[in-house]
Image (cartoon, grey):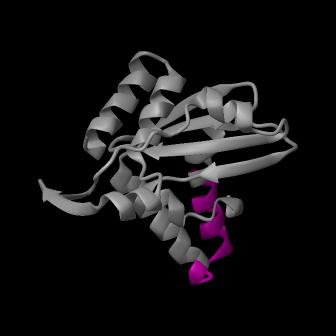
Amino acid sequence: VGQTTYDLAADFAFTRKNNFDEAFNYVERSRARSLLEMSTSGSRVVESNEKRELNIGAESEPLKPAEIKNRLPEDFQLLVYAVLDQKILMFVISKTTVEGEQFLIPDVELNKQINSYVESIQARSDLESVRHQSKELYRKLIAPIEKYLTHDGTKCIIADKGLNYLPFESL
């Protein structure tokens, strides 16, 4: 099953059904979860419609949100991001809850903003410009889920696609 199919299913479960558990399951299924599986079952890159996809020989079976919740310590929160074509799905998972929000932004635009921000930091650009970019990314990536975050405890961010290049701690 291709990445686009999982993205569509996750978007439908999140947006139309308001079912964060089901949406999270689709997001997790879409990720390459195990290097061992890739190396033992074989994988290949398939090109179609100007997109590249990695086909993995076997299906992985990721943990469901209830299983993740049971394994988390009391003062721990997972922030899980899924970048779709036109939006970002955001999940906050703790020992007791799974919450979700979304932010509408094309993935191409998000990637441009991330790249610009990282380049500004690396080039030691004007501090005011860097602050402005940081606030914009915070507004899109943290503010929508801020109401679910506790002020103490550990946060673990599981980024997706271009978000893996973003230094979240600088926001």
Q: Point out the residue furthest to the left here.
A: 49
Q: Residue at x 22, y 63 (%)?
A: 45
Quadrant placement of the N terminus: top left
133 vs 80: above or below = below
Q: Residue at x 32, y 44 (%)?
A: 85
In the rendering, at what x and y percent does residue 68 appear?
65, 35
Give the camera-side residue of 108 and 154: 154
Give the camera-side residue of 162 and 105: 162
In the rendering, at what x and y percent does residue 20 appear?
53, 25
Number of numbered markers: 0
28 vs 112: above or below = above
Quadrant placement of the C terminus: bottom right
Q: Main secondary structure of the magenta part?
A: helix
Left or right position of 13 against 69: left
In the rendering, at what x and y percent does residue 142 appear?
64, 44
**Which of the 4 quarters of the picture holds residue 54?**
bottom left
The span picked out in magenta is 122-136
Residue 62 visible in image: yes
In the rendering, at what x and y percent does residue 97 appear?
70, 25
Q: Point out the residue furthest to the right here.
A: 152
Q: Residue at x 58, y 46 (%)?
A: 141
58 vs 8: above or below = below
Residue 94 visible in image: no
165 vs 49: above or below = below
Q: Point out the residue furthest to the top here.
A: 17
Q: Residue at x 64, y 43 (%)?
A: 79
Q: Is residue 127 magenta?
A: yes
Q: Is residue 89 magenta?
A: no
Q: Point out the residue furthest to the front here.
A: 40
